[in-house]
Every structure is written in C-alpha cells, then in structure tokens.
Image (cartoon, rainbow, N blue to C red):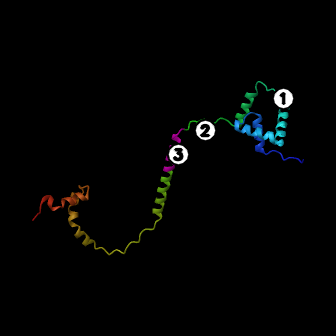
C-alpha cells in the first residue's frame, strides 16, 4: 500500500477540536465514525495524542513576579493611550445624526456655491437696441408723479395706491 495523502487543514482543525473536546455532539459523532473507517485519520489522531503526551515531559517555564507589569509597560510604549481611544467609547447613537447633519450642510454649501459661481459666469443677456429717449417728453409724462413725490414717499406699497384709485372707494369725481 502506497503513502496516503496528509489531512487537509480543515480535517486537521476538526480533529484537533475533537481531541480538545470543542466539537458539538453531531460533529463529534461524525468524526468518531470517520476515525472508525479511515485509517489515515486514525493515524493522525494517534500521532497528535502522543505529541501532546510528550509535552507533559517538557520543563514548564516559570515567569517572574514582574512579568505582567513589564509586558504592559512595553505594550503601552507601542500603543499609548490617547484621548481619541478614550473618546471612542463615548460615541452614542447621536453621532450618526450629527454626521448626517454635517453631510447635509456641506452638500448645501457646495450646491449654493456652485449655483452662485455659475450665475457669476453666465453671460449677460444681450441688450436690445433701445430707442433714444427724449428726456423732456419723459419728464412731461411723469410731471404729476414728480409734483406729488413727497406724498408718494409716505406710501409703503404700490398696491395701496392702486386700491386708492378704485372709483368705488370714494365715488366718482363727476
């Protein structure tokens, strides 16, 4: 009989989880059935059991009393506590609302500026050739308004003047 191919990574991780007692009951039963029929899986399981048994014969490392504090000091040098890491936990559900409000304000500002820029850049409409205006004729036509200018200055709204011109308001002057 030739050499059998090794187990795949998934098969090996399932086997290790089984030996550690970490598989659920259904998966454990399926793996036990596979161990009964597959010599390759059974051989791998026996090898792993013997390897772990040998680990018991190795000397156990001992740590010093200051090991924990020294490790934390070294880790804090690489990753110091910053104000942003402290404030990261303070974010609440309102942060999403504030973010969207900022997006809306920025979008509105950009839109307003774009329209304003376009309006400034738009060419002025062509001016139709105006007829020469006779200034004297214009003054004669507007003489009545010019004479009563100080009275008109007291009026805030042109619609008020139009209502005053209604013949039903004061009656006819006939």
Query: Disc number at residue 84?
Result: 2
Q: Are marks 1 and 3 in contact (CB under 8 Å)?
A: no
Residue, x 45% and y 62% (percent of image)? 119
Asked whether the viewer can see residue 24, the reply is no
Estimate the x, y position of residue 160 in percent, counting from the top left. Answer: 22, 57
The residue that mark 1 highlights is 56
C-alpha span from label 2 to label 1: 46 Å
The residue that mark 3 highlights is 99
Q: Which mark is in front, 2 or 3? A: 3
Residue, x 21% and y 57% (percent of image)? 151
* Mark 1 nearby-residue class (10 Å; few <14, some 14–19, many ≥20): few
Asked whether the viewer can see residue 106, the reply is yes
Q: Is residue 94 left or right of residue 72?
A: left
Estimate the x, y position of residue 174 in percent, counting from the top left. Answer: 9, 65
Question: For the residue labelled by badge 3, is the local secondary structure a helix, a strand or a loop?
Answer: helix
For marks 2 and 1, the one nearer the N-term is 1
Q: Is residue 147 left or right of residue 12?
A: left
Q: Bounds of the magenta span?
A: 92-104
Q: Which mark is in front, 2 or 1? A: 1
Estimate the x, y position of residue 100 in percent, counting from the top left. Answer: 51, 47
Q: Is residue 91 left or right of residue 143?
A: right
C-alpha span from label 1 to label 3: 57 Å
For marks 1 and 3, the one nearer the N-term is 1
Q: Name the foreground residue: 49 vs 39.
A: 39
Residue, x 62% and y 37% (percent of image)? 85
Q: Which mark is in front, 1 or 3? A: 1
Q: Are marks 2 and 1 in contact (CB under 8 Å)?
A: no
């Amino acid at each position: 009989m030739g050499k059998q191919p090794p187990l795949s990574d998934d098969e090996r991780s399932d086997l290790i989880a089984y030996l550690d007692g970490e598989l659920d009951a259904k998966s454990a039963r399926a793996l036990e059935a596979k161990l009964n029929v597959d010599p390759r899986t059974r051989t791998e399981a026996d090898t792993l059991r013997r390897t772990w048994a040998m680990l018991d014969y190795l000397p156990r490392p001992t740590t010093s009393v200051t090991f924990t504090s020294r490790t934390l000091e070294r880790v804090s040098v690489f990753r110091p506590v910053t104000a942003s890491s402290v404030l990261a936990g303070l974010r609440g559900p309102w942060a999403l609302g504030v973010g969207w409000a900022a997006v809306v304000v920025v979008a509105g500002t950009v839109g307003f500026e774009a329209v304003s820029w376009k309006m400034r850049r738009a060419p002025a409409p062509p001016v139709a050739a105006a007829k020469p205006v006779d200034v004297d004729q214009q003054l004669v036509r507007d003489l009545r308004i010019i004479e009563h200018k100080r009275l008109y200055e007291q009026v805030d709204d042109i619609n008020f003047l139009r209502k005053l011109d209604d013949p039903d308001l004061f009656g006819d002057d006939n």
